[in-house]
Amino acid sequence: MSLAHYDSIWLGADVVTLRGGRYGIIEDGAVAVRGDQLAWVGPRSELPPSHGAVVHDFGGGIVTPGLIDCHTHLVFGGDRSREFEQRLNGVSYADIAAAGGGILSTVNATRAAGEDELLALAEARLAMLLADGVTCIEIKSGYGLTLESEIKMLRVARRIAQTHPVQVKTTLMAAHAVPPEYAGRADDYVALICEHWIPEVAALGLADAVDGFCEHLAFSPQQIARVFDAARAAGLPVKLHAEQLSSLGGSALAANYGALSADHLEYATAEDAQAMAQSGTVAVLLPGACYLLRETQLPPVALFRRHGVPMALASDSNPGTSPACSLRLMLNMGCTLFRLTPEEALAGVTLHAARALGLEAELGTLEAGKMADFVHWPVAHPAELAYWLGGQIASTVVYRGQRR
Ligand code: DI6
Ligand code: FE
């Protein structure tokens, strides 16, 4: 009888596979790893005989896929805690913006910071997300708004992947805001992004996707369409911040471009949901921003369910609207604020988050052939991951087959 060859076997826990977006619990399961991939997943009682594998017994608890934070603005200079305080002392957002605050203050601080400084700041924030079992993270540019500083942000994001046990997907988001140099000339700025920046960043291999902010205070659907055309010409997939503050049809536009995801979506309509379902565009829900802005319009979760739009959850970690440091807290907020079930929430940071990054063939579920990224949690049931309001659960993270 031939013996299977595995490098390691991890057992003694229930395996929450997330196959098909359901918990898919295998009681008393086992996970076998070869190289950096899962070679076998199933009930311990059916584990094929093998030789040479190092066996790890968790002695209880559950194993889930590594968590994926599919929407962050992790790299930025400065912080906006004093603005947060000013607002709570009655200073209006408009007054803060007029005094050079708001997103522009982050742009100034990010432009002024050196690459190493930005890296150190991002690493401190990354450490908090990693402690929550995150094994893959998306990071956007968009606080530089010059070619040089956008490239600087993306380089920092790439360096994080080289120096930390985490997979990083980078997104060029030059169309985040109109930079001060182009005030009143948004079309000229869009032309610059389309004709020069996207081709250049694509040629440098620094971006895995292109994103934009479709909103009255940012860019119109027409302007975003030009950005998407340029992304397409450069061979890059697209995503979009859409329907966050008003309904402009940005999510349907994104769907028409076959976008990986449309994100925020508080004001999305039935037409938007239908278009997204047709194109397989993931709805990325961001409860941290909703919470901080005290937004009362909630994303139409029931519509997404009805139309079969896959829903992901992410931190939107950014200094202005979601200074979030915990993806597990987002699970809780997704359930409490948006009425997702804990099962939907967990699928939203695994399978559907993988899909929002174009990584569903490699990540997001526990099954043979996918990357060996998984987390052991000393809890009895996966609902507990969404239950606690933050705090830490002493998890064990395995990244690419190695204990992290
Ligand atoms: N939507 C948001 O909520 C953030 N960006 C975006 O496109 C706000 C970013 C900031 O205020 O710094
Ligand atoms: Fe965002």
Image (spheres, rainbow, N blue to C red):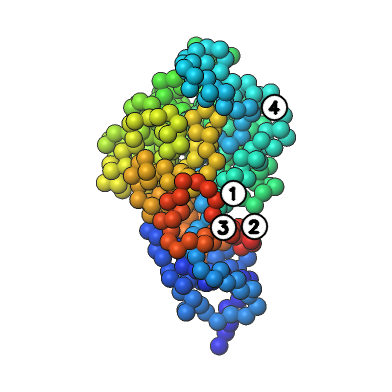
Mark 2 and 1 residues: CB-CB less than 8 Å, in contact?
yes
Q: Which residue is found at the position 31% from the left and 35% from the top? A: 272
Quote the CA–CA distance across marks 3 and 4.
34 Å
Name the image quarter holding residue 296: top left
Nearer the camera: disc 4 or disc 1:
1
- The image shows residue 278 at horizontal and vertical percentages of 32, 44
Give the numbered dot on residue 130. 1
Q: Nearer the viewer, residue 265 or 356?
A: 265
- The image shows residue 219 at horizontal and vertical percentages of 45, 22
Whether 175 is drawn above or below 324: the answer is above
Q: What kind of residue is marked 3?
A: Ser
Give the numbered dot on residue 60. none
Give the numbered dot on residue 404. 2
Give the numbered dot on residue 395. 3
Q: Is residue 323 left or right of residue 299?
A: right
Q: Which residue is mark 4?
A: 113
Give whichever of discs 1 and 3 has the lower sequence position.
1
